[in-house]
Image (cartoon, grey):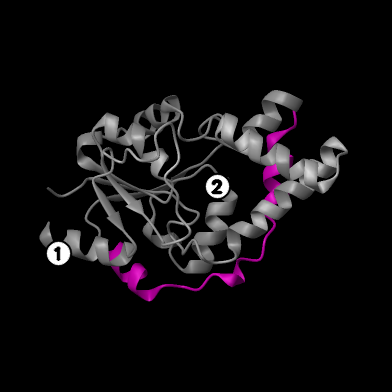
Amino acid sequence: MSFKDWLFDLDNTLYPASSSLFPQIHERMGTFIAGALKVDLSTAHELQRNYYRTYGTTLRGLMLEHELPPDDFLAFVHEIDVTVLHPNPRLDAALAKIPGRRLVFTNGSARHAENVLNHLGLARHFDAIFDIKAADYIPKPAAETYHRMVETFAIDPRQAVMFEDLAHNLVVPAELGMTTVWVREEGHSFAEGPDPHDLSYIDHTTDDLAGWIEDRVSKA
């Protein structure tokens, strides 16, 4: 079966999780929280982890627990050095051959996604970005956010495939009927959720995104 819609997470999916990009975001989150809540950096990082586990994103926790404005947070944490990322010509070529819509579905901001995609030289391949603002700041893996995304782009889940580095973000897509692909880099990708040993909702696992796309397109 060929897919009509190809949905890609951004961070640690369209570039290697072993790059030093996301650690920059992590550190800037802690710095923002320390300044906004007037706590030391250790406490800030503890809150950051707790909010992520409880609410799906640190931002959601800050909004619900402290009524912090999301745009200020997003602008600060995404002021990062994207030059640590390196363009991937093979992924560039693979994305160009996809016979369908290509969408970025991220818990980050559209501005961050555009910055990363432009630096990687991949922006031209994507038809749209569904970001955390489009999700009304309710992050993956909340089911309502997937439903909102599907409705926004009139996606038939049975004819869609989704790529993610976080396994638990593929649970709802699988329930909707999407084909699910876990982009897993050894030592950097994690199966989280109620039962990290149950990966029955994952259809495919790969450590080579470009190769997986090439193989699928060649068989379509």
| Up-down relation of residue 177 to residue 33 (above or below) | above
> Secondary structure beneath disc 1?
helix
Amino acid type assigned to the residue bearing label 2 in the image: Ala
Up the image or down, 183 lies above or below 122; here it is above
Q: Which residue is mark 2?
A: 110
Quarter-wise, where is residue 195 in the image? Answer: top left
Residue positioned most to the front: 197
Q: Position of residue 189 (x, y in %)?
A: 45, 54
The amino acid marked with disc number 1 is Ser
Quarter of the picture holding the C terminus: bottom left
Quick check: 97 left or right of 167? Answer: left
For the stretch drawn in magenta, the main secondary structure is helix
Front in this rendered view, residue 101 or 62: 62
Give the extent of the magenta segment.
Answer: 67-96
Residue 218 - label: 1
Residue ID at (41%, 39%)? 169
Q: Is residue 46 magenta?
A: no
Disc 2/disc 1 C-alpha distance (Å): 31 Å
Q: What residue is shown at x 28% (from left), y 38% (from top)? A: 201
Residue drawn 85% across and 43% down? 35
